[in-house]
Image: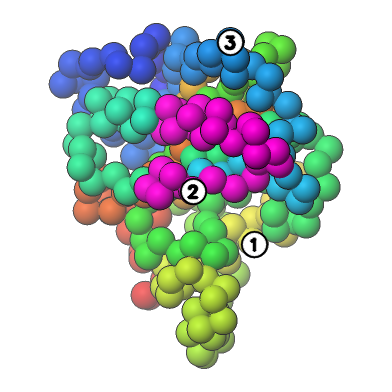
Amino acid sequence: MLYPLNTRYWEESFSADEQQSATLALEEGKVIFLPELAFQLKGYEKPLLTPAILGKKYKNVSFNPNTQEMKGVADKKNERQVLMLMDRFFAQSYAFVEALMPHYKGKLIKGRTSYRPVEVAGRKTSILKDDTRLHVDAFVATPNQGKRILRVFCNINPFDQSRLWHLGEPFEEVVAQFSKDLRRPIFGSRLLLRLLGITKSYRSLYDHYMLMLHNEMKKNEEYQKNVRKEAIHFPANSTWIVMTDSVSHAALSGQFMLEQTFYLPVEAMLSPEHSPKFILQKVLVF
Ligand code: SIN
Ligand code: FE
């Protein structure tokens, strides 16, 4: 479900009412949709809009705003411009989220910025990496120990092509469908994953169950085919904000997008009872 806001500027300010209702809407699993909020590319940045920007084996450019490290750009001569663009998108998203949701001010943890120049439709991947299937986000290598995943997406397609998503059922219903498939981890397996460096930090039970949920959703053909879903076309030059760990979503088509990930401790939410951790703990002991 969309929560539209007709904001046009990244530096917009909001009334206390607007802030409170947008924050609650986001936490309840709505998608904050900003149809008029575009990310402005500078003239000299337009040539960066091509999949040829990517090095072999990369499907996106990844930037860490904490360290300014960047991966995925093929040609050294483009690196500085891509980095400047991504850092600008990070800074604008961060300022915007803090202005719209001041309850989170100082609590957001800065995650990766990504630039995705490849057409989504027809891309070949394994089932578990296939984001055209409905899923909630949970990362194999990056456990988050219960923190929320808050993402800002911006369609920067220069040919007026929208990005097509499916939105699935509410998180409670996803959990009700799959709780019977969420098995306990094999003894010692999570420690082993850590020791082998497969996970960047210890995979908590929360992370284990979220990853299982992500995998079980993607693997279940019946579910993918029959579950109630809504198609949303995010137009070129629009922005949307979603908590992707609780909102069931899939990206079906579209090309050229910027995305910024933030992590948010559950305690920093206005209504922590909407967190996946809280909802999972109603049916699982951990
Ligand atoms: C995803 O988070 O599943 C993919 C979103 C996108 O590429 O539009
Ligand atoms: Fe996802």
Q: CA distance from mark 2 to mark 3?
A: 24 Å
What's the residue at 53%, 51% (across, down)? Answer: 137
Question: In the depicted view, which residue is nearer to us: 97 or 231?
Answer: 97
| Amino acid type, mark 3 | Gly
Which range is magenta?
A: 64-90
Q: Is mark 1 within 8 Å of ligand 2?
A: no
Instruction: Name the side, left or right, on which 241 lies relative to 179.
Output: left
Query: Which residue is painted at 78% across and 57% down in the image?
Result: 126
Residue at the (54%, 76%) spot, across then down: 197
> Counting other residues with Cα less than 10 Å from the Cα at mark 2, is it few (<14), some (14-19), or many (20 or more)?
few
The structure residue drawn at horizontal position 49% and vertical position 22%, both measured from the top left corner, is 239
Q: Which residue is mark 3?
A: 43
In the displayed orientation, state which residue is furthest to the front.
77
**In the image as oriented, which residue stretches furthest toward the left?**
16
Q: CA distance from mark 2 to mark 1?
A: 33 Å
Q: Tell me the tag on residue 69.
A: 2
Residue 179: percent from left, percent from top? 53, 65
Counting labels gives 3
Q: Can you tell which quarter of the image residue 28 is in?
A: top left
Three-letter code, disc 2 = Glu
Q: Give the residue pinned by disc 1.
A: 216
**Labels 2 and 3: the sequence-earlier one:** 3
Q: Secondary structure at mark 3?
A: helix
